[in-house]
Amino acid sequence: MWQFFHKLGSPKWFFGISARFMPWLLAGGVLLLMAGVVWGLAFAPKDYLQGNSYRIIFIHVPTAFMAQSIYIMMASAAVVTLVWRMKLADVFVKAVAPVGLVLTFLALFTGAVWGKPTWGTWWIWDARLTSMLILLFLYGGVIALDRAINDEKSAARAVAVLVLVGVVNIPIIKYSVEWWNTLHQPASFKLTEKPTMPPEMWVPLLLSVLGLYLIFGWLACIRMQTEILSREQRTRWVKEFVMRGRS
Amino acid sequence: MNAEARPEVRLASSSVGALAAMKGVFARDMKVAFRQRQDLLNPLLFFIMVVTLFPLGVSPEVSFLREAGAGILWVAALLSVLLSLDHLFRHDFDDGTLEQLVLQPQPLFLLILAKTIAHWMLTGLPLVVLTPVLGVMVHLDGNSIAVLCLTLLIGTPVLSLIGAIGAALTLGLRSAGVLLSLLIIPLYIPVLIFGTGTVAAAAEGAAVGAYLALLGAFLMLALTLAPFAAAAALKISLSNG
Amino acid sequence: MAFDSFSAFITMDGHGPYVWACYAVFFVLMLVMMIGSVRSRTAIIESCRRGYEFQTDKSKVAATSAPSASFERVNVSQD
């Protein structure tokens, strides 16, 4: 068990194993996402309340879901960084934070565009959109702190502390934003909450969530590989990997 | 800065109890601050100026100011605490006192707690004292002013405590001030929401006990967790340089 | 198929611009991110390779044009 744990922390081992998974992650992710999106766009029935604008849900929900779960994953990795000082964990946090930022932005953008036909305005200070915006700030802070510290090791640990402080705050932020929202505009129309969603709607939604998850896995692998290569330039295995196929 | 202006931390031996050490750090920070009174005054001036900008920039109408007054005062207080956070560790970091503090046998988070309490007494508390005057200037009624003071009294220590984490993380970095704001403002949002929400509820005549209790819960949470996070961050920042 | 014709699919009862703008931005950003990740990986491999080749070239040059006198440590035991 512990041997496996140590192996897991070895960048070289990760490099080898991830290379084997990556094509499958990419192929599966693109296939599932495309299936979900095409099904959702062209074949799912029209929503009786919102009309066709609801079709944005098939990318809005996956991006919003990923944006939140990436932060949770980063927090778990931050614990590993602080407790076991595993190299791979801080490589993960560093590689994945920009992806989280982009997905949070996409969730916000699709939410805002969806709001135009539904609410008649681009932006509304709705609880979900506002807490997504705060999540975007949290991602921005993590990336900015990481860029500002030159020393790799202390950057990783400082970022880990910040991510953990953020993850303690996320439920508080969510709760307070929801409370604030009911205070200022009671009973607003909710975007995604439906009494019952027919399977023709939620099956494609599930497909696109899974697809985006797999694509995120591929992105995480390739970005971690980049980070590992730049950190371990001086080791022999990187040299062998890079010079392979050359005399 | 001459040596006279910066008294040393006198708690070298491990025989000094943790509480006595906290007292020592607290007393020293107060003494240093009172020798440089301008640093004490600056956040207060900033607070007043930001509040002045709103009637000038938006509208001096009584109806607008009465509705927005609590929010304006809260945002101004938040910004001036943010502005003063840079001083929390900066001077001690520059002259090496901070390294001595980390090397003390007493637990670091207690010493940081003492420093944070001193910081609050020097910035948060004066803001609360000033609030009634500014509250009258933005036409808040007496009851709202009282509730606003209470929320600030409970809320500003939370701001100082969370801010200590950010100040510790950005210690010794270039452009630390802007970075500090980027990291800390999202974490301040819940306090701001409940602080202004409580005043709004009071203005509508609702009972505010529950809201104040929630703010108190924030304070307790920050008191128990923030010093540990700040201590961890401080150790990381010091090993950096 | 939920639509009667292809043009109905494009206009989506007037909601077309919103839906298609969302999907366009989503796919463009995802593609940019994916291609960017791949490119930065190949870039780092390339820069490593150049670094290693530079090193080996330098050692080759040093080996061929051996100087007549050098300050290298001579491994002769003195006891």
Image (cartoon, coloured by chain):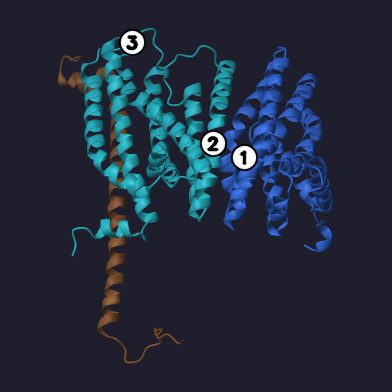
Q: CA distance from mark 3 to mark 1?
A: 43 Å
Q: Which mark is residue B229?
A: 1
Badges 3 and 1, same chain: no
Q: CA distance from mark 2 to mark 3?
A: 35 Å
Q: CA distance from mark 1 to mark 2?
A: 9 Å
- Mark 1 is on which residue type? Ala
Q: In which quadrant of the rendered image does the N terminus of chain C lie?
A: top left
Q: State which chain disc 1 sits on.
A: B
Q: Residue furthest left?
A: C5
- Who is closer to the viewer here, A243 or B61? A243
Q: Is residue B172 visible?
A: no
**CB contact under 8 Å: marks 1 and 2:** yes
- Mark 3 is on which residue type? Met
Q: Residue at x 66, y 27 (%)?
A: B218
Query: Which color has been applied to chain A in this rendered view?
Result: cyan
* Chain letter, colour brown in render: C
Query: Which color has been applied to chain B in this rendered view?
Result: blue
Quick one: label 2 or label 3, which is nearer the N terminus? 2
Q: Is residue B82 above or below residue B224?
A: below
| Residue B225 position within the rendered picture, expressed as x and y whole percent measured from the top left | 65, 34
Q: Is residue B87 above or below residue B142?
A: below
Q: Secondary structure at mark 2?
A: helix
Q: Residue furthest bottom?
A: C68
Q: Secondary structure at mark 3?
A: loop
In this rendering, position of residue B234 left or right of residue A209: right
- Who is closer to the viewer here, C7 or B102? B102
Residue that numbered label 2 is attached to: A164
